[in-house]
Image (cartoon, rainbow, N blue to C red):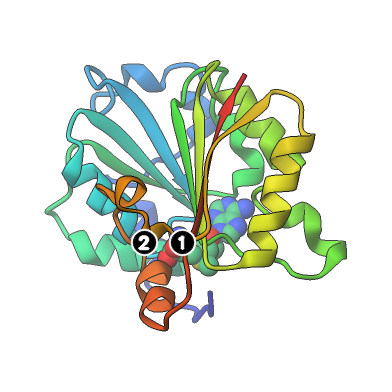
């Protein structure tokens, strides 16, 4: 994602009551937070961008608590602006790097992880930065319960193939679902909420790839 520095983004994110602060202090007690308590589960999106997906999911599933994670405040700020004070009570944002995930969440604190159109990092020497690299899969495994899921969508075939291999080769993961044309798969597409990148690339005629993997 091309980034433009927005000077007002940092103070806006810092003072927003909808952006979680000091997530490491919440580790082990997410389910006690007012906006999570009483919900069926906590689902997170890593790399939420401007938030279309997670905002849509929070509206469609009021019984689930959603946390959108994005590492750049200039991007997160756009999602904050979209909502203003009309913020769903089951949704919060976190400006952090997913590499720190296990500092924020204990084992079994998150039931589902969404990765949407993650940065492909095409150079081999950057493979570790891909959000489906086994280093990240191990972190996801640490915070999910047995049977917890990762759902991944992309238009990038190379990243998708890499992700399939990583899941097959990494201990503790089982592939549940794979499609190379999500938008032409009526069953898998039911309830699909499009991300900003998904709208852009599908309108250009790119097929959308999706996989779901669970911990075992
Ligand atoms: C290509 S954009 C996709 C945005 C959105 N998910 C979509 O589908 O439209 C990838 C986003 O992931 C964020 N991101 C990449 N690596 C991250 C990490 N390690 N932790 C948190 N966010 C990350 C980037 O800043 C960027 O906003």
| Residue 31 image-quadrant placement | top left
Q: Secondary structure at mark 2?
A: helix
Identify which residue, 148 or 82, lies in the foreground. Answer: 148
Q: Is residue 133 visible?
A: no
Residue 25: image location, x then y, percent = 50, 26
Q: Which residue lies under the disc numbered 1?
A: 181
| Residue 84 image-quadrant placement | bottom left
User: Disc number at residue 138?
Assistant: none
Q: Which residue lies under the disc numbered 2?
A: 184
Identify which residue, 72 or 154, lies in the foreground. Answer: 154
Is 91 positioned to the left or the right of 155 in the image? Answer: left
The 10 Å Cα crowd at callout 2, few under 14, some 14 to 19, many 20 or more, is few
**Relative height, residue 50 to residue 55 (above, below):** below
Pick the quarter of the image with the C terminus. Answer: top right
Is 187 positioned to the left or the right of 165 in the image? Answer: left
Residue 42: image location, x then y, percent = 37, 28
Is 209 positioned to the left or the right of 39 in the image? Answer: right
Residue 207: image location, x then y, percent = 47, 69
Q: Residues under labels 1 and 2: Cα distance?
A: 6 Å
Mark 1–mark 2 CB contact (< 8 Å)? yes
Q: Secondary structure at mark 1?
A: loop
Q: Identify the residue at the far left of this view.
A: 86
- Residue at screen point 20% across, 37% down: 61
Residue 35: image location, x then y, percent = 24, 29
Q: Number of callouts in the render?
A: 2
**Relative height, residue 206 to residue 39 (above, below):** below
- Residue at screen point 64% across, 50% down: 131
């Amino acid at each position: 994602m091309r980034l433009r520095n927005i000077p007002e983004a940092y103070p806006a994110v810092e003072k927003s009551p909808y952006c979680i602060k000091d997530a490491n202090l919440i580790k082990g007690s997410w389910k006690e937070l007012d906006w999570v308590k009483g919900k069926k589960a906590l689902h997170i999106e890593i790399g939420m961008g401007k938030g279309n997906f997670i905002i849509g999911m929070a509206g469609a599933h009021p019984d689930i608590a959603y946390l959108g994670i994005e590492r750049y405040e200039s991007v997160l700020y756009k999602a904050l602006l979209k909502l203003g004070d009309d913020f769903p009570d089951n949704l919060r944002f976190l400006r952090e790097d997913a590499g720190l995930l296990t500092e924020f969440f204990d084992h079994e604190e998150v039931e589902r992880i969404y990765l949407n159109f993650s940065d492909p990092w095409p150079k081999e020497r950057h493979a570790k930065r891909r959000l489906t690299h086994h280093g990240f899969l191990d972190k996801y495994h640490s915070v999910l319960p047995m049977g917890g899921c990762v759902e991944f969508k992309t238009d990038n075939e190379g990243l998708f193939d890499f992700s399939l291999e990583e899941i097959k080769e990494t201990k503790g993961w089982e592939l549940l679902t794979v499609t190379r044309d999500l938008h032409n798969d009526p069953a898998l597409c039911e309830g699909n909420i499009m991300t900003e990148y998904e709208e852009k690339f599908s309108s250009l005629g790119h097929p959308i790839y999706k996989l779901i993997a669970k911990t075992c």
